[in-house]
Image: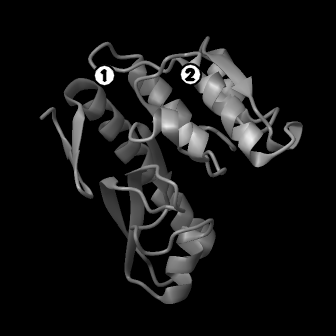
Amino acid sequence: MSGSGTNLQALLDACASPDFGAEVVAVGADRDAIQGLTRASDAGIETFVRKVKDFGSREEWDAALAESVAAYEPDLVVSAGFMKLVGETFLDRFGGKTLNTHPALLPSFPGMHGARDALDYGVKVTGATLFIVDAGVDTGMIVDQVSVPVEDDDTEETLHERIKVVERSMLVESVGRIAREGYTVDGRRVRFGRA
């Protein structure tokens, strides 16, 4: 996690219900003193921080991150809000079971500024995407998407705030379904349910 942890809080709230079917076993971040770490600690969840600058190379950081995550033996890794690209070592261990969110309807407007780029392009509808992380930038297989209309008076901030609301809901719904039903991947198509 890199930021305020609103996606994390939504997952923590959902996990409080036994019917949800999932639990958060740990929270990792790439920065100290962020609200997401506080949210996790307040909920009694173990945390760790792995900063890129603390390692001799990006590859060393990636390996350390993979080791830290592996220590908790997760069935699923949710990197929503984590603004760093993971590398080959991490993907060798957690590829296919690492999810991320993006504030646009991929494959349109990948990268750091999905809402701004959609607004600048003049689209009438954008949204949020949940996808399986791969080695590319926002190129993984799409698990779920939710649309958001672009209003005439939208700014980047107002649009992004509306996207974040549906993103949280989509993330919680999809993680719950994955925990309860599983998912399968056929080419680039992701389906809820076991094969």
Farthest residue to the bottom: give it: 122
Query: What SS does tag 1 mark?
Result: loop
Q: Earlier in the sequence, mark 2 or mark 1?
A: 1
User: What is the crowding at mark 2: few (fewer than 14 residues within 10 Å), some, or many (at least 20)?
Assistant: some
Along the line of sight, which residue is nearer the eye, 170 or 66?
66
Q: Amino acid at mark 1?
A: Phe
Using the rendered view, name the quadrant where residue 181 is placed: top left
Rendering quarter of residue 142? bottom left
Query: What residue type is disc 2 on?
Result: Ala
**What colour-coding does the image apply?**
one colour
Residue 98 drawn at (x, y percent): 45, 39
Classed neighbour count for the residue bearing mark 1: other residues with Cα under 10 Å, few (<14), some (14–19), many (≥20): some
3D distance between C-alphas at marks 2 and 1: 23 Å
Quarter that holds the N terminus: top right
Query: Which mark is in front, 2 or 1?
Result: 2
Return the mark for residue 164.
none
Residue underneath mark 2: 70
In the rendered image of this protein, does residue 112 appear above or below residue 38? below
Image disc number at residue 20 = 1
